[in-house]
Image (tube, helix red, strand yellow):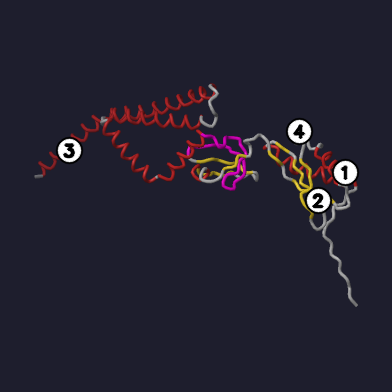
């Protein structure tokens, strides 16, 4: 019995050795195919990226196309490596299809963000560099990814918003028309002449370097308890909006001081009753 057991052990080791020797070259070849194939895919991706940029294609579309081509080529490399090992390509394709269905069912929400990203790239409600107001987030679009839109807000925060959420409500593209109206409110004392104050405000706005050369609106908006409230509406490019906003107020305040115009403010008198 001991001799038989020893003989079986020798046979098992021999079979195992033969199996390893038979499969080792295929496994090594498959690993080489993967390594070399992925390097070639990376090189091809760089060439395609340069070609797309040189062709003048939409810069928003370039990262999406490169990533899509890269995924397709890598899948082809993996299938080739599997064929080198001896896996039937048809069976491997069926396995990928089945796995794709399972992953798709588990990632239905993520796929909806992918579809929304494709719609953004096609219909372009906003583009990279645009100043936008999306779902209450105001900022500049930094990147449109496959699943997310990256926005740099005005207070220097990076907001990563899923494309499905970004496109599910009202999207305001503040850069679409090339200019923005800057809404300012200036108080004028009741005793002052409107035309005089209007001229002073116009002169102050002329000193704001980043303001657009369009005639601003300067009109009476309403009467409050202490002053006449004026609507002052200069125009600015999206990137200069806040410069115009703050500098306009600064120049108007300075001009009012030089002209001796004092804006009324609420006061409280206390009377002592003996």
Q: Where is residue 262 in the image (x, y as percent from the top left)?
A: 87, 51
Mark 1 highlights which residue? 196
Assess whether residue 141 is covered by the magenta stretch.
yes
- CA–CA distance in space, label 4 to label 3: 90 Å
Q: Give the range drawn in magenta.
A: 123-146
Residue 126: name its quadrant. Answer: top right
| Distance between the alpha carbons at the discs numbered 1 and 3 | 106 Å
Give the residue number, with chain letter if any, for mark 4: 213
> What residue did someone put label 2 on?
187
Residue 151 percent coordinates (x, y): 58, 41
Residue 18 in the figure: left or right of residue 241: left
- Per the image, label 4 sits on a secondary structure element best described as loop
Where is residue 13, by image quadrant?
top left
Cα distance in 3D space between marks 1 and 4:
21 Å
Q: How crowded is mark 3: few (under 14 residues within 10 Å), some or many (20 or more)?
A: few
Task: Determine which residue is flagged by label 3.
Answer: 12
């Amino acid at each position: 019995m001991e001799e038989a057991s020893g003989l079986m052990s020798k046979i098992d080791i021999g079979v195992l050795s033969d199996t390893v020797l038979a499969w080792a070259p295929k496994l090594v070849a498959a690993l080489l195919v993967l390594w070399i194939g992925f390097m070639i895919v990376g090189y091809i991706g760089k060439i395609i990226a340069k070609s797309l940029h040189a062709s003048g294609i939409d810069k928003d579309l370039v990262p999406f196309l490169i990533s899509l081509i890269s995924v397709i080529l890598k899948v082809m490399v993996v299938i080739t490596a599997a064929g080198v090992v001896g896996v039937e390509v048809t069976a491997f394709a069926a396995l990928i299809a089945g796995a794709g269905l399972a992953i798709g069912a588990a990632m239905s929400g993520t796929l909806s963000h992918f579809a929304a990203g494709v719609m953004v790239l096609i219909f372009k409600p906003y583009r990279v560099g645009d100043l936008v107001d999306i779902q209450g987030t105001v900022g500049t679009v930094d990147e449109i990814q496959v699943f997310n839109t990256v926005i740099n807000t005005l207070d220097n925060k990076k907001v990563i918003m899923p494309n499905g959420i970004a496109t599910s409500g009202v999207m305001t593209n503040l850069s679409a028309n090339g200019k923005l109206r800057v809404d300012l409110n200036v108080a004028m004392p009741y005793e002052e002449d409107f035309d005089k104050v209007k001229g002073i405000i116009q002169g102050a706005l002329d000193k704001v370097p980043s303001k657009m050369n369009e005639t601003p609106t300067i009109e009476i908006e309403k009467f409050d308890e202490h002053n006449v409230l004026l609507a002052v509406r200069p125009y600015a490019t999206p990137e200069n909006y806040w410069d115009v906003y703050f500098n306009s107020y600064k120049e108007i305040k300075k001009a009012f001081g030089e002209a001796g115009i004092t804006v009324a403010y609420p006061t409280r008198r206390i009377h002592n009753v003996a």
